[in-house]
């Protein structure tokens, strides 16, 4: 991926660097063939801003995001989060980094199928060590913030694509993450639902970039 562009647009002038990735290369070898998905890619992700990665299909966007969230080790290069090289951490510490810092939204939804909507939204909190009662309370608030509280006891797989994606947003936001990572979150949605999700993302970034005093 040499043609993928990394745009950074900031709402606040002095946006601090949250993540810095440097010289990222990723190759996949299957059988005798090697595909280089990323070739020496560098950039930064800033706090309280919408950071957008664009590029044609197959240019390595999803691979880069997987690397940034600690799910896929690069062939070479470093990912620094708050100055810490996440691939020098052990697997448990990297999992803790994800649970503590990140909320993720994808094009397709990944639900725990045996759990209802509010239980799925509670999952990131349970992973971060909240007790069930606290988790349920916060999950309800998060569902309210995306207008989906009335579907709390439904099974998510029975809902429309637009409803499911709003619930994914509630799950991504519930633990108040430093970063929301969204990989083509509007890719399966119609225009109206797509702009609704973008509005929710922009609102979340604005909320985050407010001074905390
Ligand atoms: P994008 O998200 O921009 O469409 P991807 O990151 O999904 O691009 O893919 C970039 C390239 O890496 C593609 O050529 C893809 O086929 C390849 N690729 C991605 N993941 C794997 C994998 N697990 N094994 C082999 N090749 C892969
Ligand atoms: Mg992709």
Image (cartoon, rainbow, N blue to C red):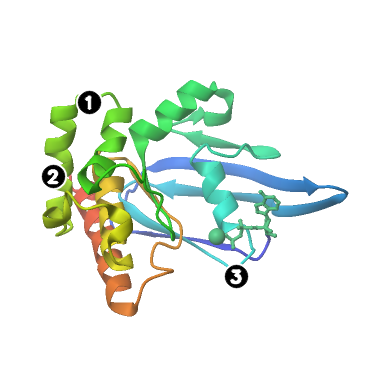
User: In the visual, does 77 lie left or right of 137?
Assistant: right
Name the quadrant containing residue 161: bottom left
Q: Is mark 2 within 8 Å of ligand 2?
A: no
Residue under pointer 1: 130
Residues at marks 1 and 3, CA–CA distance in whole angstroms: 40 Å
User: In the visual, does 136 lie left or right of 30?
Assistant: left
Residues at marks 3 and 2, CA–CA distance in whole angstroms: 37 Å
Name the quadrant containing residue 35: bottom right
Q: Which quadrant is home to the N terminus?
A: bottom right
User: In the visual, does 36 lie left or right of 152?
Assistant: right
The label nearer to you, 1 versus 3, is 1
In percent of the image, x 43 and y 69: which residue is there?
A: 187
In this view, 37 is above or below 54: above
Residues at marks 1 and 2, CA–CA distance in whole angstroms: 14 Å
Q: Residues within 10 Å of mark 1 (few under 14, many from 20)?
A: some
Residue under pointer 2: 140
Q: How many marks?
A: 3
Residue under pointer 3: 56
Q: Is mark 3 within 8 Å of ligand 1?
A: yes
- Whether residue 44 is visible to the viewer of this picture, yes or no, is yes
Q: How far across and how far down the image is residue 169, in percent?
A: 28, 53
- Whether residue 13 is visible to the viewer of this picture, yes or no, is no
User: In the visual, does 192 lie left or right of 75?
Assistant: left
In terms of secondary structure, where does tag 1 sit?
loop
Mark 3 / mark 2, whichever is N-terminal: 3
View quadrant of ligand 2: bottom right
Q: How far across and how far down the image is residue 89, in percent?
A: 53, 23
Q: Residues within 10 Å of mark 2 (few under 14, many from 20)?
A: many
Q: How far across and how far down the image is residue 47, in percent?
A: 34, 46
Nearer the observer, 213 or 200: 200
Mark 1 / mark 3, whichever is N-terminal: 3
């Amino acid at each position: 991926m040499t043609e993928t562009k990394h745009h950074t647009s900031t709402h606040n002038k002095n946006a601090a660097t949250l993540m810095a990735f440097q010289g990222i290369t990723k190759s996949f070898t299957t059988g005798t063939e090697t595909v280089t998905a990323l070739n020496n890619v560098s950039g930064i992700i800033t706090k309280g801003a919408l950071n957008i990665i664009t590029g044609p299909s197959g240019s390595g966007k999803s691979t880069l995001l997987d690397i940034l969230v600690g799910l896929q080790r690069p062939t070479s290069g470093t990912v620094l989060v708050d100055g810490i090289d996440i691939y020098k951490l052990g697997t448990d510490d990297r999992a803790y980094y994800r649970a503590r810092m990140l909320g993720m939204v994808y094009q397709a939804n990944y639900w725990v199928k045996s759990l209802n909507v509010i239980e799925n939204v509670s999952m990131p909190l349970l992973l971060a060590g909240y007790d069930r009662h606290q988790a349920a309370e916060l999950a309800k608030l998060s569902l309210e913030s995306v207008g989906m509280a009335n579907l709390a006891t439904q099974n998510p797989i029975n809902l429309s694509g637009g409803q499911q994606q709003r619930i994914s947003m509630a799950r991504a936001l519930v633990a108040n993450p430093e970063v929301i990572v969204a990989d083509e979150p509007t890719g399966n949605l119609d225009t109206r639902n797509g702009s609704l999700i973008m509005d929710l993302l922009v609102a979340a970034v604005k909320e985050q970039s407010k001074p905390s005093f």
